[in-house]
Image (cartoon, coloured by chain):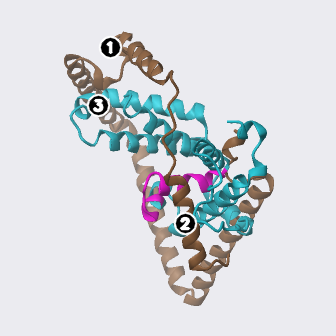
Chain colours: A cyan, B brown
Amino acid sequence: MRAYQDMVYSTAVRLTGNSAQAEDIAQEVFLRAYEHFANLRTSVSAGGWLKTVATRLSLTHLTRYRRRWRLFSELEAAEAEDESPEVQFPATDDLLAELTAEDRARVVESALARLPERQRVPLVLFHFGELPYEAIARELGVSLAKVKTDIFRGRTALAAMLTSAAVPHDLTPATRSR
Amino acid sequence: MSVTPDREAKLERLVAQALGRQALLPAPAELQTRVLAEIERRAQLPWWQRRVASWPQGMRLALGAGAGLLSVGALRAFAVQLQGALSASTAPLLLHVRHAGQLLLALGHAGASLLAAIPSQYVYAGIALTATAYVVVFATAALGYRVLTLGTPYSQPASSR
């Protein structure tokens, strides 16, 4: 369990954006793993199994608590099309070149958690889950076009947040002292 | 959204680079304790309070046999009851059912004749009208839902939960 607990927890917390829910999900993942221990102990794909279960449980959790009709959400998302902020790309190929590794990690996780769920979930599945667009659309039960749009908007919003966080004066004194 | 492919590709590259460098987040220290405690708690439960899949094999067999016997008994009892219900005392009821069936059949024939007499363009117009009415009702419901219920995107930002 020690070998995989960070991976399972990271998967859940990045998808749900909530540490308490992620901890519950991680617990459930390991309880299921315990029930399948006989198969998993010798399996070379135990890590993949755990990641898949963590992803599925996180998505189920999000679906269960969404309580809104997906169609109307898509209508609303379409209306919000112009909300994507304009990003000024940095001269270098690094959005956070100015920051230390520790600040960089904190800023990225914080920005990720601030994204709306409809953008964060497909973005996390794409970049951390390494799923292709088609698989994400299947997992989320939405159209391919919506997945692409949401991921693009998520990237734009994330880049904007990271760009603004990379400016030294945006860091709080507490952050700088770390 | 007017974005050049170059700009989109650069955005993807920058974000992939920023996210790709992220290390795993450390799981809370108490996670392992919680999992072990829950395993312990479940192990303490008497077998009948656990999932059926983890019951002793004999008990699972007994449950399957019991459920099978119960089903067979219920089906037989139902068959006996049905046989009794279809006895001579219910013959008048069956007669009414037969008459009702004949009536429905006659109505069906009449309806089919009527439909055949209606010009096809009227039928298509009726279908189009029904579809339009359906769309209008659906759109009204959607509009009402959005106006009355949705104040925010379909999810709150995670930081506000």
Q: Quadrant of residue B134?
A: bottom right
Residue type of the residue flagged with mark 1: Trp
**What chain is tagged by disc 3?**
A
Range of residues picked out in magenta: A115-136
Quadrant where the C terminus of chain B lies?
Answer: top right
Q: Is residue B41 left or right of residue A175?
A: left
Q: Name the residue under label 3.
A: A36
The answer to whether tags 3 and 1 share a subunit is: no
Quadrant where the N terminus of chain B lies?
Answer: bottom right
Q: Is mark 2 on a helix, strand or loop?
A: helix
The answer to whether tags 3 and 2 share a subunit is: no
Answer whether residue A124 is magenta in the image. Answer: yes
User: Which residue: 50% across, 84% down?
Assistant: B116
Magenta stretch: dominant secondary structure: helix
* Viewer-nearest of discs 3 and 2: 2
Q: In this view, does A176 lie to the left or right of B14?
A: right
Q: Position of residue A75 (x, y in %)?
A: 67, 64
Answer whether residue A59 is magenta in the image. Answer: no
Q: Name the residue under label 1.
A: B47
Task: Give whichever of A58, A102 is nearer the camera.
Answer: A102
Q: In which quarter of the image is residue A132?
A: bottom left
Q: In this view, does A64 lie to the left or right of A91?
A: left
User: Which residue: 19% across, 17% down?
Assistant: B58
Q: Is mark 1 on a helix, strand or loop?
A: helix
Label 2 close to label 1 by CB (< 8 Å): no
Q: Mark 2 points at which residue?
A: B12
Residue type of the residue flagged with mark 3: His
Which of the marked residues, 2 or 1, is nearer the chain's N terminus? 2
